Amino acid sequence: MMPVRPNIAAIHAYKTPWAMLDRMEYLRLDLNENTQDLPECALERMVQFIRETGVGCYPDYRVANRQLASYCGVPAECLLVTNGSDQGIDIVLRAFLAPGDEMVIARPEFAMFGNSAALLDAKVVGVPYGEQFCFPYETFHEAVTPETRLIVIINPNNPTGTPVSLEYIEWFLLRFPNVPILVDEAYYEYTGISALGLLQKYDNVILLRTFSKAFAMAGLRLGYILARPGLITEFEKIRGPFAVNGVALAAAIAQVEHPEGMRAHVDEIMNRSKPFMRSFFEANGISFIEGAANFFLVSVPNVERMVDHLRSHKILVRTLHGPRLDGWIRMGLGSLQEMQRVSAAMLDL
Ligand SMILES: Cc1ncc(COP(=O)(O)O)c(C=O)c1O
């Protein structure tokens, strides 16, 4: 084989542990997806788009840009659609990190940050989360040095679920005005908490969001970056002209015009499924960390046995690996009925 660059050869490709399974046969609580169907309005709009516009021409982003910007309450020039927020991560890191440059992030973090940094041969300075995976408020800023070219705050983080206060993010923006600070808000619709208001005041804040989670569109690959217009122009050079497909945009436009479906889902997850599982874990002495989004961390005496047992009940959850994560399962939240099924299966072990 022709040798590729050594830093690329050293990376382990992201693979789900269920690569050999047909995930569609399972209740999928392993990747923080929305277990519910896409709202009907989005389905209809995709069909209409394919019938009327077709897929023979390259996509045009102008309408989607306006509509998504209006959903966010920002001018269209502040938004760039991306191929999932994975691509948003890659674009922002590529914009700021040259080989050897430092990126500061709390650890353990969402895997794609390390992956994109490794592709660039950049250095990741990981600041450990505290007890119970609390954000390291006391030590995070100490990791920022003159070599730091990017600071990442994932709010809330995956896999730990850890939220970060907006006051702290603002303090950070003020304290390091010459360093770009990327705030990943993949779970924004669940938390309702966003640093977007800070975009007017600070030009070093950049936000990432996605349609993969609350909007149930993980398979369509649509995310977006929010930043000052000058930065968006630079990010667009990296993204290229046609990275996002028109069908995904049609579905997204329908959903932001009719957000009732997404809101009903968020309401069920946060106000029914989550309290139900919290009570279930407490009542049965199961250790858990709740986090701020649509998933829990759960610790049981024999993780592999529990994961296999749930799998035999056609339920997928994620075993976590790595420093601090061994011994934890990440369990996404589905509808109340789905979580009743999960709790019954857990008791049946
Ligand atoms: C914190 C965080 N950021 C980004 C992503 C990537 O999402 P996507 O590429 O599907 O938009 C995820 C997915 O799990 C995530 O948890």
Image: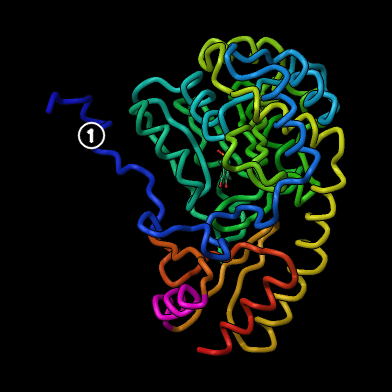
Q: Is mark 1 within 8 Å of ligand 1?
A: no
Q: Residue furthest front?
A: 51
Left or right of 93? Residue 183 is right
Q: Residue at x 46, y 21 (%)?
A: 94
The image position of residue 30, as x and y in percent, is 52, 60
Q: Nearer the viewer, residue 340 or 118?
A: 340
Q: Start and end of the magenta stretch? A: 302-313
The image position of residue 211, as x and y in percent, is 67, 38
- Tell me where residue 84 sits by quadrant: top right
Res. 205 visible in picture: no
Q: Residue at x 64, y 33 (%)?
A: 208
- Tell me where residue 215 sits by quadrant: top right
Q: Say which element carries label 1.
A: helix
State whether residue 185 is above or below residue 327: above
| Residue corresponding to mark 1 | 9
Left or right of 84? Residue 118 is left
